[in-house]
Image (cartoon, rainbow, N blue to C red):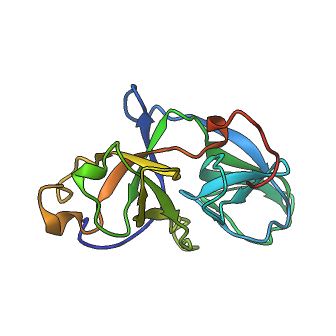
């Protein structure tokens, strides 16, 4: 499991201090004709009132994309990803935006027990998969810092094959993380993608 690199974005796990599957999603508009795919598990940002996929590590995340509903050719569609250049009306992204939410994500290289709750990391902004609708985002292990970063790992995910004591099993570990650099973590609001 964690011996193979297979980045597939963020998967909601729980809210800190709460049980599993206690996630919250809200609807946000996606602009008609938006020029990039948005995949389930991608970090998204606010861009002038619309949801855009995160494209740089300097942006503050609105949350994690969980799917979309939109009307195209007079038909309501539900999808795990929003296809680029889709001409539509009333497109709404489902975004997990609770700042207390935690997520499961795979690292693109080894992370140690010493990184848990003490280091921050940026995100590997990988391309998603149009067949599965899943993201290609991951935790970028080479960016560990005690300074500002998008993610903070809070635990190794407790599943077989992901034992932090066995080096081979954590070549690409599955981690439970929380988002650090979100729009809710900053006092000053901005309406741009920064």
Q: Find residue 188 and report its image quarter.
A: top right
Count of marks placed on residues: 0
Q: Closer to the camera, 82 or 115?
A: 115
Judge from the rendering whether residue 14 lies leftward or rightward of residue 55; answer left or right.
Answer: left
In the image, taking residue 27 as reference, residue 33 lies left or right, namely: right
Q: Residue at (70%, 52%) from the top-left corner?
A: 45
Residue 106, x across and y down, in percent: 37, 61
Question: Depth check: 149 or 22 in front?
Answer: 149
Reply above or below: 114 against 13. Answer: below
Query: Percent from the top left, x then y, of residue 19?
Result: 37, 28
Which residue sits at x=75%, y=44%?
Answer: 28
Q: Is residue 43 above or below residue 14?
A: below
Spot the residue most to the left. 166
What residue is drawn where x is 48% and y is 54%? 10
Q: Left or right of 82: which side holds 65?
A: left
Q: Quadrant of the C terminus?
A: bottom right
The residue that appears at 57% across and 59% down in the rendered structure is 42
Return the x and y of residue 52 as percentages of the image width and height.
73, 58
Q: Quadrant of residue 111?
A: bottom left
Q: Nearer the viewer, residue 160 or 53?
A: 53
Rendered location of residue 173, percent (x, y): 29, 61
Residue with the most extreme top position:
17
Q: Quadrant of the N terminus?
A: bottom left
């Amino acid at each position: 499991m964690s011996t193979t690199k297979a980045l597939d974005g963020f998967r909601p796990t729980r809210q800190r201090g709460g049980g599993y599957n206690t996630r919250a999603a809200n609807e946000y508009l996606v602009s008609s004709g938006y020029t990039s795919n948005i995949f389930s598990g991608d970090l998204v940002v606010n861009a002038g009132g619309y949801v855009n996929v995160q494209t740089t590590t300097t942006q503050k995340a609105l949350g994690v994309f969980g799917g979309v509903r939109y009307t195209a050719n007079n038909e309501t569609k539900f999808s795990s990803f929003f296809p680029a250049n889709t001409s539509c009306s009333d497109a709404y992204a489902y975004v997990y935006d609770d700042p207390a939410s935690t997520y499961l994500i795979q690292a693109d290289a080894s992370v140690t027990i010493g990184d848990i709750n003490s280091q921050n990391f940026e995100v590997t902004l990988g391309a998603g998969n149009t067949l599965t609708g899943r993201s290609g985002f991951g935790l970028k292990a080479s960016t560990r810092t005690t300074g500002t970063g998008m993610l903070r790992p809070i635990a190794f995910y407790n599943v077989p094959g992901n034992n932090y004591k066995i080096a081979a099993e954590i070549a690409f570990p599955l981690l439970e993380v929380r988002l650090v650099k979100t729009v809710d973590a900053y006092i000053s609001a901005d309406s741009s993608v920064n």
